[in-house]
């Protein structure tokens, strides 16, 4: 969620009332009130107290970022409260400890508030029997088709059955059959037989997204998740229900039957599709990306991400990716020769004769190297803004992941894109003889083929081919964010790391690598050979980065004040 | 340590007892049952339960039993198995309500160590170590058996449970065709 929301959560912090409770004999002190899914302060529940004590309570319907429903009963625990005498004072044992009245009935930990002196018993034989009972009921009509279920391997029903369930079924009657492979919407497939009716999906789309699309129809064992007749489950957040669904009822059409989840290597990274920079995990196997899943970061995206960003990975594996470095003559084909030729052309260039169109899709480190290059060549730089639709949840209208980084490093004009007209004029007047373009198709932004034809040297670095790379004298194939390391600065000034998940195709290389080499050829000074060194050098040199260190970024990033002094 | 070589006594120096003992062994084997096989004209029939090559099987209705759960691929110690799952647009499974069937299934018989883990782990009884022990090919590519070859070699398995058929009948009896196609 946004910065503002987090701030709301933590503002009324000072007067914390604390409550002491015991979980399985272990004393924990918890705040009397804790933030609920909206950040409002509500009484702390037993499940939160257990969490604080390091005791895991199995649960299906409870989710910290959703309203509490309390319908699955998986979280049942036993508890007791201090006994009160006729004088309303706690009764004590001869040894001074409080007498505890054990409640005759269990309670659901997800919805029961803690009270002072409460004792929670999370591992008694009674609790174990209740968990076993709940699981037995959940499995009565469950189809047990794990071999064909995409959730297998990350399924809470599987996990809890192993941990708390029983190995054999006592159910001999016919199972209730429900529709399978139901087309809920453009990205979601529903298997009603697998559903355990926890209503997480319903609460998510109704309360978080504000699209009341799902509900339960029919009664008793025939309960079925459905959309309103004639409507589709189609908003930009539907795929989050696939992660939320504790079983394999809601599955992603995109990932359907593609790969078993236990084969996927998960790489921590950041979504490059808009200025928000949601944290994500890249699931890849054998150099192929299979899916993106959100990674919980309360300061940025919480546990969610939008569907558009999640499915924006297919272009990385496109066949027409730029794979070969190219110099001005056909025999110049290796990186060494191409960079040497390019450096030879750039070194004598006079100040003002070179212009650089960089991109806010590049990482901070790469933009820093471009900045150094521009300083050496006396070149003007700019980036091209890409605006789209934003929403009130996660999606930002800025479709570049590193707009703030490009601004802080002085690569973008004010406002971004303002220099492009000057570039066009400069080329027309013959002042600009060399244009270097990163990750953009400038022919679509006022620098048409006729203008580009007037240049002595056109250098294009990109991932996919476009009109500019076709016209370019030098082509430098770069990497998708999933193929390199680096960092992005999101729209709120949070610097977050991206990590390499797959290898780039052919000769394509991370931009920061060849930019560093090019810079060395031109300036005879070596740029740091690691991304850590590069980042630390940048943060030391550029005041806007406040001397951050790469190591300090961690997995979830660091927010910098965007306006120095503010 | 140095072992001193003992000088031979006169009987040993004569050699005749040794020759006689040698002939005794030869004659004994001459009269015994023959054990050498004239391979490849003669072929060994392996005992029941021998762990030979793993093959895929079809059920008695001719359906591919494998549902592409990839557990064998996971458990295979030498990584001999490579399964390509159907993906969202793959061909529909032979048994419609089983939903899945591998697009491709390859076993590299050069890698396979015939441990039988795949048969053990298979939740669908779709792969069995059969009694084939002779695998011949003139190059490496030939030793990678694909789905078609594995199914042909595996033949039919008399499935006593027929889980999916049973499920389908149960669902139909409740007026619920499980998978809309
Ligand atoms: S589809 Fe999944 S998330 Fe929705 S109610 Fe069923 S089990 Fe819960
Ligand atoms: S988690 Fe408490 S009732 Fe479902």
Image: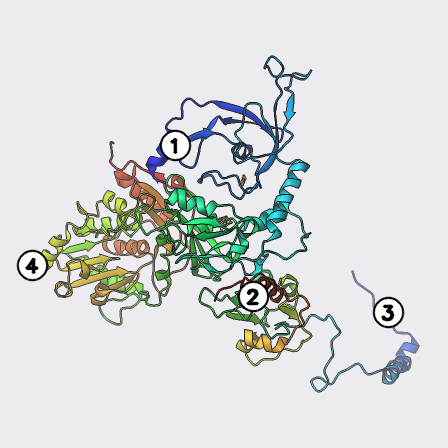
Nearer the observer: mark 3 or 1; the answer is 1
Chain letter behind tag 4: A
| Residue at disc 4, CB closer than 8 Å to ligand 1 | no
Which of the pair B95/B70 is nearer the observer? Answer: B95
Q: Circles 4 and 3: CB distance less than 8 Å?
A: no
Q: Label 4 belongs to which residue?
A: A429
User: Outermost residue toward the top?
Assistant: A87
Q: Label 1 belongs to which residue?
A: A9
Residue B67: mark: 2
Nearer the observer: mark 3 or 2; the answer is 2
Tell me if I can see residue A151 in this picture: no
Residue A245 is situated, as x and y percent measured from the top left of the image, at: 49, 49
Residue A32 is situated, as x and y percent measured from the top left of the image, at: 48, 26
Q: Secondary structure under badge 1?
A: helix
- Taking B9 as reference, is A363 above or below it? above
Answer few, some or many: residues within 10 Å of disc 2's Cα (few below 14, many 20 plus, some between 14 and 19). Answer: many
Q: Secondary structure under badge 4?
A: loop
Q: Label 3 belongs to which residue?
A: B6
Q: Quadrant of residue A36?
A: top left
- Taking A76 as reference, is A227 above or below it? below
* Marks 4 & 1 on one chain: yes
């Amino acid at each position: 969620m946004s910065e503002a929301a987090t701030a709301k959560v933590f503002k009324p912090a000072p007067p914390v009332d604390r409550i002491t409770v015991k979980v399985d004999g272990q004393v924990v002190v918890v705040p009397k009130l804790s933030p609920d899914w909206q950040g409002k302060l509500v009484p702390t529940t037993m499940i939160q107290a257990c969490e604080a004590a390091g005791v895991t309570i199995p649960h299906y319907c409870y989710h910290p970022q959703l309203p509490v429903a309390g319908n699955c009963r998986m979280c049942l625990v036993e508890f007791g409260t201090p006994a009160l005498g006729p004088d309303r004072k706690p009764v004590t044992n001869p040894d001074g400890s409080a007498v505890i009245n054990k409640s005759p009935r269990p309670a659901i930990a997800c919805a029961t508030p803690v009270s002072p002196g409460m004792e929670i018993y999370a591992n008694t034989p009674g609790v174990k029997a209740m968990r076993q009972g709940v699981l037995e009921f959940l499995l009565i009509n469950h189809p047990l088709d794990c071999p064909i279920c995409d959730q297998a391997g990350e399924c809470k029903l599987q996990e809890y059955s192993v941990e708390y369930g029983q190995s054999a079924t006592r159910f001999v009657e016919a199972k209730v059959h429900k529709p399978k492979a139901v087309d809920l919407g453009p990205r979601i497939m529903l298997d009603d037989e697998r559903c355990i009716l926890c209503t997480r999906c319903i609460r998510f789309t109704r309360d978080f997204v504000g699209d009341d699309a799902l509900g339960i129809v029919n009664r008793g064992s025939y309960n079925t998740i459905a959309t309103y007749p004639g409507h589709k489950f189609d908003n930009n957040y539907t795929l989050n229900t696939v992660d939320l669904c504790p079983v394999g009822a809601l599955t992603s059409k995109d990932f359907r039957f593609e790969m078993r989840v236990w084969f996927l290597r998960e790489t921590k990274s950041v979504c490059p599709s808009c200025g928000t920079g949601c944290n994500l995990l890249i699931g890849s196997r054998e150099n192929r990306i299979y899916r993106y899943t959100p990674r919980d970061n309360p300061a940025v995206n919480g546990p969610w991400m939008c569907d558009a960003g999640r499915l924006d990975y297919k272009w990385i594996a496109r066949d027409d990716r730029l794979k070969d470095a190219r110099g001005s003559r056909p025999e110049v084909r290796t990186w060494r020769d191409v960079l040497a030729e390019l450096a030879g052309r750039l070194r004598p260039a006079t100040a003002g004769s070179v212009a650089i169109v960089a991109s806010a899709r590049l990482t901070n480190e790469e933009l820093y190297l471009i900045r150094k290059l521009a300083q050496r060549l006396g070149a003007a730089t700019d980036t091209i803004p890409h605006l789209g639709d934003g929403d009130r949840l996660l999606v930002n209208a800025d479709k570049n992941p590193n707009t703030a980084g490009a601004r802080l490093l002085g690569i973008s004009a004010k406002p971004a894109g303002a220099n492009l007209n000057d570039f066009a004029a400069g080329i027309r007047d013959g002042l600009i003889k060399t244009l270097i373009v990163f990750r953009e198709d400038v022919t679509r932004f006022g620098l048409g083929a006729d203008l580009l034809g007037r240049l002595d040297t056109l250098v294009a670095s990109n991932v996919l081919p476009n009109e500019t790379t076709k016209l370019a004298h030098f082509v430098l194939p770069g990497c998708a964010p999933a193929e390199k390391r680096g960092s992005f600065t999101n729209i709120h000034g949070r610097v977050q790391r991206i990590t390499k998940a797959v290898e780039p195709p052919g000769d394509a290389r991370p931009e920061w690598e060849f930019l560093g080499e090019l810079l060395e050829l031109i300036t005879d000074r070596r740029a740091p050979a690691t991304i850590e060194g590069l980042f630390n050098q940048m943060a030391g040199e550029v005041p806007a980065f406040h001397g951050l260190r790469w190591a300090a970024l961690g997995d979830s990033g660091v927010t910098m004040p965007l306006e120095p002094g503010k | 340590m140095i072992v001193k070589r003992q000088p031979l006594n006169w009987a040993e120096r004569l050699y005749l007892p040794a020759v006689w003992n040698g002939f005794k062994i030869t004659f004994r084997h001459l009269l015994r049952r023959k054990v050498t096989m004239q391979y490849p004209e003669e072929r060994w029939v392996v005992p029941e339960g021998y762990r030979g090559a793993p093959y895929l099987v079809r059920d008695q209705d001719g359906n591919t039993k494998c549902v592409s759960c990839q557990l064998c691929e996971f458990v295979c110690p030498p990584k001999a198995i490579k399964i390509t799952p159907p993906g969202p647009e793959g061909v529909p499974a032979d048994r419609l309500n089983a939903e899945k069937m591998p697009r491709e299934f390859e076993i590299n018989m050069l890698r396979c160590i015939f441990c039988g883990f795949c048969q053990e782990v298979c939740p669908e009884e779709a792969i069995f170590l059969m009694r084939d022990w002779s695998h011949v090919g003139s190059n490496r590519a030939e030793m990678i058996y694909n789905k078609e070859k594995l199914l042909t070699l595996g033949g039919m398995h008399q499935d006593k449970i027929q889980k999916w058929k049973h499920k389908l009948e149960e669902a139909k009896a409740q007026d619920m065709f499980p998978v809309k196609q």
